[in-house]
Amino acid sequence: LDLSANDLPAVPDVVYKLKALKRLNLNDNQITELTAQSDGWPQLEILQICRNNLKSLPQQLMRCTKLRRLYLNSNQINLHGLPRGIFNLEQLEVFSAADNNLETIPDALCRLGSLKVLNLNKNRLLTLPEAIHFLQLKELDVGENPDFVMPPKPKECQKGSGPAFYNIDFSLANQLKLAGQVAPEQSPASTDIQQKRAARIRRLNKPEQRNPAGSGGSSETVLRGMRETAKRKHALDSGLGNNGHYNDDEEIAGRRWDEQIERPQLNYSEFFDDTAGQCAGITCWEIENFLPKQLERQLNGTFYTGDCYIVLYAMVELSGNMDWQIFFWIGKDATLDKQACAAMHAVNLRNMLGASCRTQREEQADESEEFLALFNNHLRVIDGARTETGFWVVRDVEHPIRFYRASGTQKLHVELVPASATSLDPRYVFFLDVGPKLYIWIGKKCHSMTKAKTRLFVEKVNKSERKGLSELIQINQGDETDAFWKELGGKPANYQLVNHVPDNFVPPRSILYKVDLGQEFIELPQVELEPGGALKKELLHTRNIYILDCYTELFVWIGKKSARLVRMAATRLAVELLAMIRRPEHAAITKTLEGVETQVFKSKFDAWDDVLAVDFTRTAENVSKKGADMKKILQDNEIKTNLTALFKNRPPWQSRAAAHEALEDWNIFLLQPFSMFVYENKKFVKLPDDERGQFYSHDSYLFVARYLLPSEDENMDTSELEDEIKDSDTERIVYFWQGRNANNTAWLSFNYTFKQELIDVLGDFEIVQLIQQQENQRFMAHFNRKLIIHNGKRRTAAQRAQIPIQRLTQTQMYHIRWCYSTIMTRCIQVEATSANLCSEFCYIVTVPLDSGDIIGIVYVWIGNSVHPDDALLAQEIANEMYNDSYTIQVINEGNEPENFFWVGLGDRLPYDTSADYMRYMRLFKCSNENGFFVVTEKYADFCQDDLLDDDCMLLDTGTYVFLWKGPTASIIEVKFAAKSAEVGLDSRPP
C-alpha cells in the first residue's frame, strides 16, 4: 500500500485493519504519531515512514515481528522515542534512521542478530553501545555526526583473539611477553593523546539516564547535559588541559549493578500472549498446573483463597509509551507450587515487557492500598480454589476398550471399529487397546508396510501414553489366544474370517470445527483448510477449542489458554454433534488436552510425528563395551549409597564407674587451674574464680589450660613435680567457648588481637573452638559435672558494683541432664513451666520474693526415678549457684509446696513421668557431601544445633523415627533419606 506524498496528518483508521498488509509506504506526509492500533499488521515486512514529524514509535509496533525493513529517515526521533521492546523484531534486516535527533541507540537494537544495514547518518550521535561490534553488519553509516566516537572493540571481538583463535591472545604485547621481550615505550606526546582520548570515551559512554515520568524539564536537562559535554570536549580538543576547567583524568562513575544486569532473551510466548500489557487496563492471570492462565475480564477482582494470581496494570505515559505495574497475589490456602510459580511468572512477565518496575507481592488480608485501588477497594475473595495444583496426583486411570483398523502404506490411517471378532479382515492390521495390554492382530493378506507402521504406532502409544508400562502382544492370523478372543467378547460359533470390507473402501474425510463463544450463543464454524484438504498441526491455537469429526470418533481438543466456559460448552456440543447424523453404535467421544494428545489424534494430521528420544552421547566404542541394553547398564552402574550406620547397634553408654575414672584421667594431666576470661566491653577480662563453670548463652569465654604430656612413668605425681616440669614436657590449649546466641565479634577479636598477646606471653598453643552444648569430653571433665548455662548476658563489673545483689523478676528453672556419659552433665536454664518437668531428672527452680533479706527460694526438685548420685549433684550445684540471700530447699516429687512451687511455675500442668527415649535415641545425618549418599550417626550427646541446613536428619526415639529436612537440602537427599528411614524401620526385629 503506497500512501506517500498525501500530506496525511495521521494514518487512517482503516489502514490499521489491513491484517494481510506486507508493505506500507507513508513517506512525505505530516504524520506526527502512530497509534496503539499499529499492532494490527501481523504480516508487515516493510514500513517506510520517512520525512514526517514523528517523535517516537509506539510499543505496539514491536508486535510486528515479521518486519524486515524499517525506514525512519528525516523525522524528530530521539533515544527515548525508540521503544524498549525493539528486540522483539528478530527478523529486522534494515534499520534506517538518518537525519533524526538520536544521541545513541538502545542496547536492545544491538541484539537483533538478523540486522545487516544500520543507517544513522546526520544525527547527534555521541557514541554507540559496545555490543554494536557483535552484529554482523554489511553496512554501518554514522557519517555527519561531528561529535561521534566509536566505542572500542571488546577483547573477544579484537582480531587475534576469541574462539576463532582458540582463545589464544595474539596481541603484540602478550606475544612479546611470552617471548621474554619488552614492548617499545611510547613517546610522552602519544601517551598524552591516548589518555585524553580514553577520558573522552569514558565520558561519552556514560550509561543512559531516563527521567521518571512527571519529573518535568526532562528535555531541558538532556540539552543542558549535552551542552556541558560539548564544552568539555571543546576544551579538551583545544588543548586547554587542566587550565580549561576540566580535568582529563576525571573518573566517570561506573554503572550501577542493576543497570549492568541484562535480562535473558527467552521465549515467553508459552506463558503470555503477545498482546499482554499492550493495552491500558488491568489483566489478571491465575496459576494452573505451574502455568499462568489469563482470566476473563469479568472475573478480574474475584480471587479464591486456594489460588494465586498475577495482576498487570498497564498505563500510557504522556510520551505515548507504555508503563506497567506488576503484582502477584497469594491466597492463604494456596499450595506451594502456586505461590512459587506466581512469583516466577511475574518476573517472566516483567522481562517479556521490558518493564523496569519491580514485582510486588500481595498476600491475602494484607494487600497494599495501591493494589486495592486497582479494584476500587472491592476485592472479592471466595473460599476454595478454581485451579488444580501442578503437583502429581495419583489417580486410577480407566482405559476404555478401543479397537482400531489400520490401513494405508504411505500414511497410516487408524479407524475405530466395533470391538468384535466380526470386525477382523485378513487384508488389514488391527490394534486392540485394553489398557494394560496392547494387542496387534496381523492379517495374512495385509501389506508389510502397514504391518511395520502399525507396530511403530503402538510402540509410540505405549511410550507416550502408558509410560512404557503396557504389554505389547503381537498376534498373527490363526494364532489367536483365548485372552484375545475374550477381550473381543468371545469367538463366535462356526466363525469364519472373510473379506467383509469393500474393495473400494476410502477412509472418511475428517472435519475440524472451532468452538467460538458468540454474543448470545455458541458457534461451531468449520476450519478452512489449505488446498489439498490436509490437516496441519498449526491449525490448532492454544486459546481455542476444536472438535475433530472422524465419523466413527469425535475428538475434543482443549488448548492450554482456552476459556473455562468454552471448555464446558465444547463437551456438550460434541455430544450433540455425535447424535446429529447417523453414525455406527460404536462411535465415541475422546477428550484430549494440548501437549498430551493421543497418538490416534495425531495420526489425523499431516507431519505430526514425535521423535523418540535417542542418546547420541554414547559412542560406538561405549556401546561395544557395555552393550545397548540400557536397563542392564543402569543395573551395572547403580548409584553408590552407604546405609551401614542404620544397621549397627546403638553404642553402649559409659558406666558411672568408667566415667568417673575417665574424668580423673582427664584432670590428672592438668597442671594448674584454668585461666578464665570473658569477652566484655570489646576486650577479654579475667573471670572471677567464683564464676568457674557458669556460662551465659549471649557471651563468649576463653580458657587457657596447661597439660603435662604423657610419660612412661605411670606412678609420677604431678602435684609434687609441678615446679620441676620443663616447658618441653607440656602443652597449652586455649579453649574458646561461644554461647548459642553470641555473635562472632569475640571470636574475631580473639583472632586479630588477643591471640597475639597470648602468643607473646605463652608461646605456641593449640586453639579449640567450642559451641554451646557441643563441647568435648576433655573440656567437660574439668568442671566435675558442674557446668551451668544461663540464658541472657552476664552482668558487667560496673553493673555488679552498682547493684551487688540483683533481685529476680520472674521464676527461673534449670534442667540437669547428661547423655552417653556422666562427664557430659550440664545444668541448662529452660522455660519455667511445670510441663518441662520429668520424673527421671533433677531441676532447680528459683522463685523470687518481693521483700525482706531473702530475695528468693531455691527448690531442688528430685524426680522419683533419679539416681542418688544425680540428686546429690543437684544439691551441690544449687549451693554453688546461690549465696545466703536465697533459701535452698530440697523437695522430692510429690511433696511440692502448693503456695510457692506450683504458683511460681504458673500452674500445675501434666508432665512426663518417663524418659525412655533417653535409652534409645539416635541421630543420623543423611548427606551426599562425599559424592554419594551416606548415612552417618552423630555423637550421642547431640542437640538442636547439630541439625544441618543442607542435609537431612533422622531422629530415632525408639518409638518414632522423625525425618528432618534442611531448608537447603536437595530433593535427592530428601527422597533418599525417606527411603533410608523406611529401610531402617524394616530392619528392626518385630
Image: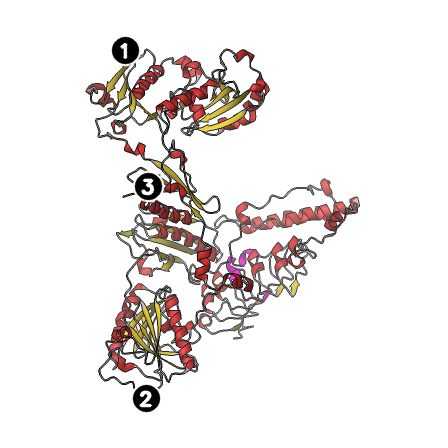
Residue type beneath disc 3: Phe
Closest to the camera, between mark 3 and mark 1, is 3
- Mark number, residue 349: none
Instruction: Please say if 774 is above or below 288.
Output: above
Q: Give the magenta range.
A: 78-99
Task: Tell which of 544 and 884 is nearer to you.
Answer: 884
What label sits on residue 962 in the rendered view? 3
Q: Position of residue 446 (x, y in %)?
A: 38, 83
Mark 2 or mark 1: whose residue is earlier in sequence: 2
Disc 1 is placed on an element classified as: loop
Residue ID for mark 1: 852
| Whether residue 811 is visible | no
Marks 2/3: CA–CA distance: 69 Å
**Amino acid type of disc 1?**
Gly
Give neighbour class at mark 2: few <14, some 14-19, many 20+ (Cα, 10 Å). few
Rendered image quadrant of residue 470: bottom left
Between residues 650 and 897, which one lies in front from this camera angle? 650
Instruction: Decide if residue 109 is on the left or right side of residue 298.
Output: right
Residue 357 on the magenta segment: no
Counting residues from the start of the chain, the first of labels 2 and 3 encountered is 2
The residue carrying mark 2 is: 502
Up-down relation of residue 523 to residue 663 (above or below): below
Q: Amino acid at mark 2?
A: Pro
Q: Position of residue 696 (x, y in %)?
A: 40, 23
User: In terms of secondary structure, where does tag 2 sit?
Assistant: loop
Tell me which numbered mark, 3 or 1, is placed earlier along the sequence: 1
